[in-house]
Image (cartoon, rainbow, N blue to C red):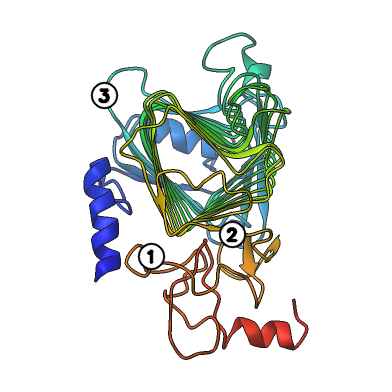
Amino acid sequence: MKQKELVSAVSRWIGVSVFSIHAVQAGDVFTVNSIGDQPTAGLITLREAIELANSTSGSIIDFDETLFSEPQTITLEQGDLALTSSTTINGPGADLLTIDAQGLSRVLTIDDANSTSQNVNISKITFTGGNGEAENPGDFEYDRGGCVFNKETLTLSHVVITGCEANVDGGGFFSLNAQVTISDSEISHNSTTFRGGGIKSDGGQLTITNSTLSDNTANRNVFAGGAIEINNTPLLLINSTVSNNHSAPGATGGISVYFNSTLTLINTTVVNNAGGGVLVSSNSLVNMSNSIIAGHSDGDCEFSNISAQSDNQNNLDTDGSCDVLATNHITVTDPMLGPLTDNGGSTSTHLPLPDSPVIDRGDDVLCSEVDQLGRIRPQDGDGDDIPVCDIGAIEFSFFLDELIFTNGFD
């Protein structure tokens, strides 16, 4: 199918499969059966499980099904958790397990302290209350990555990163020279004094699919990136939402891309961020398709000294600023999207309203195979019995969504 060809082409360009899960050598299985952070005879805490996994590459950490059948919080009392070896952590669900650093430390550091690359997979956990500077003020690494600091090959799936802060970069998450894949996740309400309120990636590679970044803040007035800032990094977002993030006046509340980076947006919604929506500069490349960039206080797009190889197709904005090196561009006054809320799926999203100009206006060749809700694309969005891909992260279905609005359940 043409959609598969599109994703395959992107995968070849960045050098890995977009949806790859990194295999690790078989190790031991450690089951956490305590919500404490102090050693207790006969029980295994998460900290102890991680320490055991660090000595056995390829280990798996899981959680006692009975204990974690209802919501539990592990409150950190001894500083951040330090993961140094290839490990898979299978959480019970982001709604069932919260790891809270109480603002006294970062939550998790992933770094083996040498040049080798470890493969780490983490799923179904909520990280909160991280503050790296509180643990080691002025330290380069602890000034970055309020919740998570990463230097290894990392896959995050169905995680929530929220309520964390960093003194310099990456309020929620910071990655240095590492390959990172984030899917089906929420990164929200994180903050930083400088750049990357939600995420900062410096070198390496960052892929985000089916995820939402919202209500993050970067307080710097240059570049900033309220949701995401990348430097010398290929960034790929597919079926994702970047909404209601913030920066200082004159900076970028949404996505900031600079210094020989590459930004690729496919069926992504970037809306209502305070400041600019998307900034691409410093000889960086931008390829956007079937995406919404709309409703920003300081302009939807700012492209400065971008690569002439940039290619933007079938996008929609509200001020015409994204219509650069573009074909089939649409500019409207209002994309007509519903509020950011639970519309099904694993993350909050903006559902198009029934008369939205994004419905059936995408390019099927450039379209992703499913939307952020997991709904198959394309759908018939206007009731003419002809399925056509929508612009943005959510595919409106005339027969499903129109019925909801008609019956007043919006």
Which-is-in-front pick, marks 1 and 3? 1
Q: Which amino acid does the dot numbered 3 rest on?
A: Thr
Q: Which amino acid does the dot numbered 2 rest on?
A: Thr
The residue under label 2 is 347
Is 282 positioned to the left or the right of 252 in the image?
Answer: left
Disc tally is: 3
Mark 1 touches mark 2? (CB < 8 Å): no
Q: Which amino acid does the dot numbered 1 rest on?
A: Cys
Residue at image coords 48%, 57%: 329
N-terminal-most mark, 3 or 2: 3
The residue under label 1 is 367
Is residue 151 shown to the viewer in this render? no
Per the image, label 2 sits on a secondary structure element best described as: loop
Which-is-in-front pick, marks 3 and 2? 2
Structural crowding at the residue carrying mark 2, measured as other residues with C-alpha within 10 Å and reported as few (<14), some (14–19) or many (≥20):
many
- Single out the residue that lies furthest toward the top: 138
Per the image, label 3 sits on a secondary structure element best described as: loop
- Whether residue 282 is situated above or below residue 265 in the rendered picture: above
